[in-house]
Amino acid sequence: MANFVYLPLAYAGGLWSGPDGSDSGYRILIPTRAWAQTVWAAVGAGPLPSDAPLALSVWTMAFGALAAWAYRRDEGERFR
């Protein structure tokens, strides 16, 4: 199941084009591209764009809220 989610995100984020690949505006909105740009900057393969950490923060908050909602929903139904 994880590959069904990750592979389309990797393709849409342009991970197979590398750090020198052409960047279009929507790609930074995809979490895999923002993470890749952060890693590429850490190893010295390119500069860190200022919007990559912001995009990762937004995705982290969104998925954290989804996980908290799912946890509360599961606990509420299981132990009533």
Image: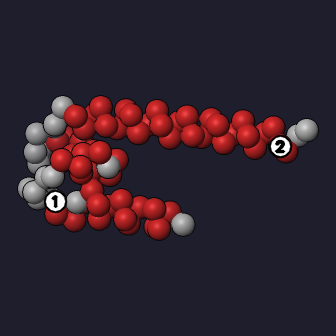
Q: Which mark is residue 77?
A: 2
Is disc 2 surrounded by few (<14), some (14 to 19) or many (20+) residues within 10 Å?
Answer: few
User: How far across and down, in percent of the image, does residue 50 sit?
Assistant: 18, 31
Front-most of residues 47 and 72: 72
Residue furthest right as drawn: 80
**Residue at the image point whose x is 11% and y is 48% from the top:** 45
User: How far across and down, in percent of the image, does residue 7 sit?
Assistant: 38, 66
Q: How is the image coloured?
A: secondary structure
Q: Is residue 21 above or below residue 38?
A: below
Question: If the image is split into quadrants, where does the C terminus sit?
Answer: top right
- According to the image, label 1 marks what residue? 18
**Amino acid type, mark 2:** Glu
**Amino acid type, mark 1:** Gly
Q: Is residue 39 visible?
A: no
**Residue at the image point whose x is 55% and y is 34% from the top:** 65
Dot 1 or dot 2: first in sequence order is 1
Q: Is residue 3 above or below residue 23?
A: below
Is disc 1 surrounded by few (<14), some (14 to 19) or many (20+) residues within 10 Å?
Answer: few
